[in-house]
Amino acid sequence: MRVRFRIWRQDNARVKGGFRDYEVDGLNEDMSLLEALDHLNEQLVLRDEKVVAFEYDCREGICGQCGVFVNGRAHGPHANMTTCQLHLRSFADGDTITIEPWRAAAFPVIKDLIVDRSAFDRIIRQGGYISAKTGTAPEANAIPVGKEVADRAMDAAACIGCGACVATCKNSSAALFTAAKINHLNTLPQGKPEQHRRVSDMVQQMEEEGFGHCSFTGACEVECPEGISVANIAEMNARYLKAKLFG
Amino acid sequence: MSLFLRKWMVALTGLFLCIFLVVHLSANCILLLPEAVARGMYNAYSTLLRESPLIKVVAYALYLSIILHVVFALLVTIRNRRAKPTPYAVNHHGENSQWAAQNMGLIGIFILVFIVVHLANFWARIKLGMGEGVGLDAQGYVDVYAVTSSLFHNPYYVAFYSLLMIPLGFHLHHGLKSSLKTLGFYHRSGLRVLARVSLFYALIMSVGFGVIPIIVYFK
Ligand code: HEM
Ligand code: FES
């Protein structure tokens, strides 16, 4: 199988970047997209050219490191999937595959396809945890949590922080990420004591990082590898109002 | 609360305008009645509105809502643009979201043009007394019916009034459901109902406002 990669190359945030085309042959459809990029990089090394910088860790859809914009979609053409789970069988022989880094003012390019997502870390630092010392794992039924509550918390906790929500959003809004992190904890009894401060501080940090407003286009929910619902954003809005009125 | 408040203002004012449109369309339905009945009813109703102190308050709330909606929508849109300074070379957002949701600002500009022309046609003539004078009907009411009817016998105005209800429909379809989510309505099955209600509402409003000029034209 043969494809043409159109890849964004940029040395760092201070210099201009641009697309470069690479014809890559000798691929097969069972390769993942990242393996195809590995293949390209091996050839670039042999030709003494700079390799394409892209990020990954687990390559099994759980760590959230690997996001890039592939042919006009965050994480590629499928809904609810990470880039590392995307295989060449999703493309046709001879296709051009355009790969761009996440685009957002809050995510400056570090190099090529790698962006700096530490804005997310700074949001987490404002309350994406509980401050009580919990020691080792307690007896599971010490604090009863209803099934529905546990499910809702787990659905939000599934966020892997990949940044696809910001990447796909026309406003580069981080509302889905922030809402998932807030609702995960605020839904559970362990998160309740700090719930108001958590939502106020995390939302404030989200705004200070320069992400846009949420327009509820719903694109984030489609591209999110975990399928986290935009209803979480509405819930965050309700929690924010409650925190400001009664917090 | 500042940044959050901006989006809340867009939602609150937008929602108020959505409610206003229901009342407005209901009143416009009088225009569908046979001319003999419609003229009297329509003029009596509009006189009632103009003379009611309550409606005076509501009218000012309405002017203010339009202005605040546009101002805050502009602020929101500017911030959103700044947050995404580099567009993608290839972007298939049609595959993950609705067109209306992606283009509320552009759609809003069409509606703004409509509102300006619409106010010039009616409000400026009837309330501010600008342009051609407005006569009285047989009962002595200001003949707003004649203003409407003559306007909608001009095919250009019929086309303008009817066609611009298409962007309105798109704006309302996304706007109604989005505003409630902005204001914190997050009940899961309620949101599914809301999506259908928004579509229904947008269809009624755009088709309703859109066909009345055409019907009046052929009356
Ligand atoms: C009859 C007139 C109008 C009605 C009923 C209306 C209604 C609404 C509603 C309900 C929303 C949703 C708010 C939210 O998502 O929280 C909205 C959003 C919006 N409106 Fe309007 N609107 C009207 C006119 C206009 C005009 C004249 C403009 C601009 C010139 C405008 C620009 C916008 C924009 C840009 C948004 C989206 C903000 C975002 O990105 O989420 N609207 N409108
Ligand atoms: S590399 Fe871990 S999710 Fe893709």
Image (cartoon, coloured by chain):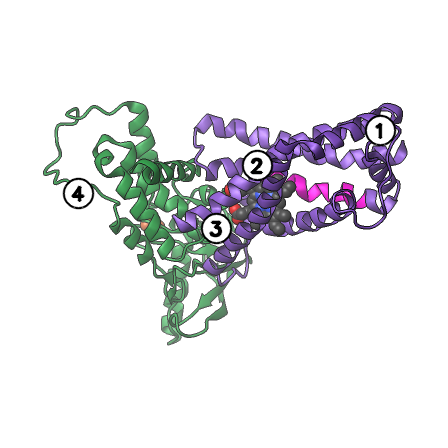
User: Label 4 sits on what residue type?
Assistant: Ser
Do badges 4 and 3 share one subunit?
A: yes
How far from the left and from the top, in percent, is residue A18?
Answer: 49, 70
How far from the left and from the top, in percent, is residue A151?
Answer: 32, 29
Q: Which chain is green?
A: A
Q: Which chain is home to disc 2?
A: B
Residue B216, quarter of picture? top right
- Chain B image colour: purple
Q: Residue beneath label 1, please?
A: B39
Residue B157, quarter of picture? top right
Q: Which chain is home to disc 4?
A: A
Which residue is outermost to the left? A135
Q: Which residues are magenta?
A: B159-176
Front tag of 1 and 3: 1
Q: Residue beneath label 4, please?
A: A131
Q: Which chain is home to disc 1?
A: B
